[in-house]
Image: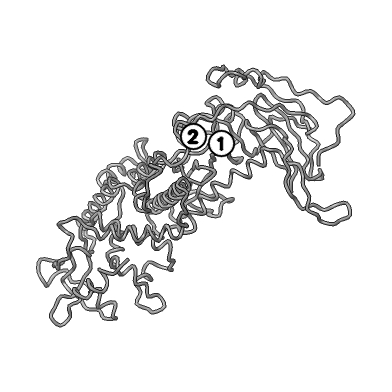
Amino acid sequence: MPQPASTEEKPKLVATPYSPRLTRGKSSSDLDLPWTKVDSKPDKWLDITNEDEEPLLPNFSPKRPPGPQLTTDRTYTPLQLFQLFLPNTAVKTIVRNTNNNAEKRVKAGKKFVWLPLTIAEFYSYVALVVYMGLVKAKSIADYWARKRMYNFSYPQSIMSRARFQAISWNLHLCDPQEDEENNKKKGTTGYDRLLKIKPLYTDVLSACRKHFHPNREILVDERMVATKARIGLKRYMNDKPIKWGYKLFVLADSSCGYTWNFFVYEGKTSTSSGKGAGYDSVMRLLDHKVLGKGYMLYMDNFYTSPTLFLDLLQNGILACGTLRHSSSLPKVSDLSGRSELGSIRWCRQGPLLFVKWMDAREVLMCSSIHKAFTGDTVTRNAKGSDGVWRTRLIPVPSAVKDYSKYMGGVDLSDSLIEHYNVLHKTTKWYKTFFFHFLDIAVVNSFILHQELAKAQSKVPLNHKLFRETLVSELARAGRASPAQTERCYPEYFGSDATHGRRVCVMCKLQGNKVKTPIYCSHCKVALCFVSSRNCFKKWHMDYHLEDL
C-alpha cells in the first residue's frame, strides 16, 4: 500500500537536461532532443508521495489508417483472403521449382513415378495440409488407412496418398539450379543460408506488411518453430513452450495478434550494431518510415534498454518493457522481499521512467510512455496480519498495468497458430518453414476476416469454421483446372500398357492390390479401366464428383 506522507519536505526530482515543458507546442521533428547526448543518472528512488510529471506524448500519426488495407465494404471469401498472402505468382514459382526438383531427382536415379504438378493440384495439396491441421492423425499414412477406426474419406476424395507424398518429397521453394550454385559458396560470405525459403519468405512477409496497418499498441517478441533437425539455424529457449526450434523475431499488433513483420534469426552477423541482439532485432523489425510516429511498443527484458528506448524516441516511437539490469540506476532502494505488496519506487533519467513494484516478486520496468503512478489499482490475494488470506486492491504503476494488457497480443498470435498448426514432421528445414509460412498466411487471413466483419457490423466465422471453409474452397480451386485439362481422361503411365503400373486407388480401398497402367489425367490417381472392372468410372461417380 502507499506509504503515508512524510512530514518532512518531499525530495525534489533530479535535475536532468530534459523537461517535458520544453516540448510543448512543438512536434518531435522540430526538436534537437539534447537529452539523448547527455549521460545523466538519477541519484535517488522516489515513492508515490512524490508527484511525477505527466510526459508529453507525440501525436499518433500512422502512415496509413490502422486496420485492413482492403475495400471495407466488400465481402471477401476465406480463399480470397488467403490468396493475398499466397498469391498466384508465389504458387507458380513453387510449382515450377517443385517440378524442376522432381526432374532433377529422376535424372539422379531416384525411382518414383512423377507427373508434372499443376497450380490447381497444388491448391488441392494445400487444402489437405490445412485439413490435417484440423483433423489430427498420428501419421500421414493414417489419413488413407483402410482400417475402420480411421476411415478418413475426405483425403481420398482430394488425391491419393502416393500423390500427396510425392508432392511432399519433391516440394521445393527455390530454383534447384540456384540452390546448387549457392551450396558451392558454403563457408564464404557469399553463401545465403536462407536461399531455400527466400521466394515464399519474401512474398509472405511483403503481404503481411501490405494488407494491414497496425493499431497504436504494438509488441515485439520471439516465436519458436519446432524442429528436431540438426542444423545451425536451430536455437534453444528455456522459457518457451517449444524449447528447440527455429527462432523468428516478430512484430505484432497487440489488439488482434496480426503478424505484421518478422524475420528468421540466423545468429550473429557482420552487420550487428554492437548494442545487443535485442536492440538489433527491434530496429530491424520496426520500420518507422512505413509505420509512422506515435506508436507504443511493448517488449520483454530481452530487448529493453535505455539506449534502445532513446533511439526509438528519436524516431517518434514510444516504448515500455520489463528491465533485466538496473546497474545504471540508484543502488539504494528500500524494496525487499519483505516489502509490502504494492510498494512502488520510481526515478527518472531524462524522458525515461524507471519504476519498481512489489508483486509476488519485484518487478522492474522502463518506459518512455508513462507517469510513475496515476492511482491505478489491481486485485491481489494477500495474507493479513491475522494470517487470513483476503482479496484486496493494491496500487500498481501504469507501466505495469499497460504492459500486462498489451503484451498478450503475441500470445494470441501464437495460440491461433499452434491450435490448428499444419506443421508436419520433416527432416528438411525449408519444408518446416513452408508449413509455418502457411500457418502465418491462414492466421493473418482469419484476423483480416474478423476485422472486416467488425467494420461491417457482421458476425465473423470462428477460427475452426474459417479453416473448414478455406479447406473446401482450396479443394474446389484444385478441381477447377484450366480448360485444356478441365475434363478427366484415361492416360498410360508409360509408353504402353506394360510400363509404369501402379496400384489402383479404388481396388486398394476395397482391400485388393491390383496394379494398372492407367491413370486419370486430371485427378492423377491410378485406376483400372477394363471391361470387368471399370474403377475409372466408379471413382469419378463416387469420389471425384463428391459435393464438398
Asked if one can make out residue 232 in the rendered structure from this viewpoint, the answer is no
Secondary structure type for disc 1: strand
Give the residue drawn at x 36%, y 40%: 192
| Numbered label attached to residue 297 | 1
As measured in the structure, the alpha-carbon distance from the residue carrying label 1 to the one carrying label 2 is 9 Å
Residue 42 or 90: which is nearer the viewer?
90
Please state if 230 lies on the left or on the right of 276 as rendered: left
Give the residue drawn at x 63%, y 19%: 38
Which quarter shows the C terminus?
Answer: bottom left
Q: Are marks 1 and 2 in contact (CB under 8 Å)?
A: yes
* Amino acid beneath label 2: Leu
Q: Few, some or many C-alpha atoms within 10 Å of disc 1 (few <14, some 14-19, many ≥20)? A: many
Q: Position of residue 493 (x, y in %)?
A: 16, 66
Residue 208 sits in which quadrant?
Answer: top left
Residue 511 sits in which quadrant?
Answer: bottom left
Asked if one can make out residue 190 in the rendered structure from this viewpoint, the answer is yes
Q: Position of residue 384 (x, y in %)?
A: 85, 52
**In the rendered view, how is the structure colored?**
one colour
* Residue lying furthest left: 496
Q: Name the residue under label 2.
A: 286
Q: Position of residue 354 (x, y in %)?
A: 69, 32
Which quarter shows the N terminus?
Answer: top right
* Amino acid beneath label 1: Leu
Secondary structure type for disc 2: loop
* Residue lying furthest bottom: 532
Give the residue drawn at x 67%, y 20%: 19
Q: Vertically, is 124 above or below 326?
A: below
Q: Vertically, is 228 above or below 529?
A: above
Residue 466 or 455: which is nearer the viewer?
455
Give the residue drawn at x 88%, y 26%: 8
Residue 150 sits in which quadrant?
Answer: bottom left
Please state if 95 lies on the left or on the right of 320 as rendered: left
